Amino acid sequence: MTIQSRKIKAREVWINTYLTLGSVSKAAKRCGIPRSTLYRWLKRYQSEGFNGLVNISQKPNALAKQKLTSELEQLILSIREKHSFGPQQIQTHLLR
């Protein structure tokens, strides 16, 4: 049994415990999880059914825009060529 299937099985148990007890607080306490977690999985289970219990990646679709001007970029490149500094040394040099 893979880790993913174990997690899905655990979430099934949480849902079934809630359906049996009829109380989110009691089910969360019995399963040893926060109520907010149980609410999240209940919402996904009600909207998507069994397929909603599968993990969804939390990775962002796009990275935040980097605030690097062309002037700063040229400065970094010149420091790298002139001194053969790495990223940490360039950062320290720029902060000075």
Image (cartoon, grey):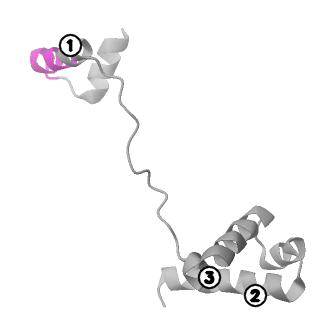
Q: Distance of mark 1 from mark 2, alpha carbons?
A: 60 Å
In the picture shown, does residue 76 fall above or below 54? above
Can residue 7 be found in the magenta stretch? no
In the picture shown, does residue 27 fall above or below 94? below
Quick one: label 3, few (<14), some, or many (20+) residues within 10 Å?
few
Instruction: Say which mark, if any, is on residue 49.
Output: 3
Residue picked out by circle 2: 16
- Write down the quadrant of residue 32 in the picture: bottom right
Quick one: label 1, few (<14), some, or many (20+) residues within 10 Å?
few
Residues 66 and 46: in front is 46
**Residue drawn 36% across and 8% down?**
96
- Write down the quadrant of residue 94 in the picture: top left
Which residue is most to the front? 47
The reply to whether discs 3 and 2 touch (Cβ–Cβ < 8 Å) is no
Can residue 78 be found in the magenta stretch? yes
* 12 sits to left or right of 5: right
Residue 59, percent across and down? Answer: 44, 55
The amino acid on which the numbered mark 1 sits, given as a three-letter code, is: Leu
* 95 sits to left or right of 16: left
The stretch in magenta equals 75-84
* 42 sits to left or right of 52: right
Residue picked out by circle 1: 75
The amino acid on which the numbered mark 3 sits, given as a three-letter code, is: Gly
**Residue drawn 32% across and 21% down?**
91
**Label 1's element?**
helix
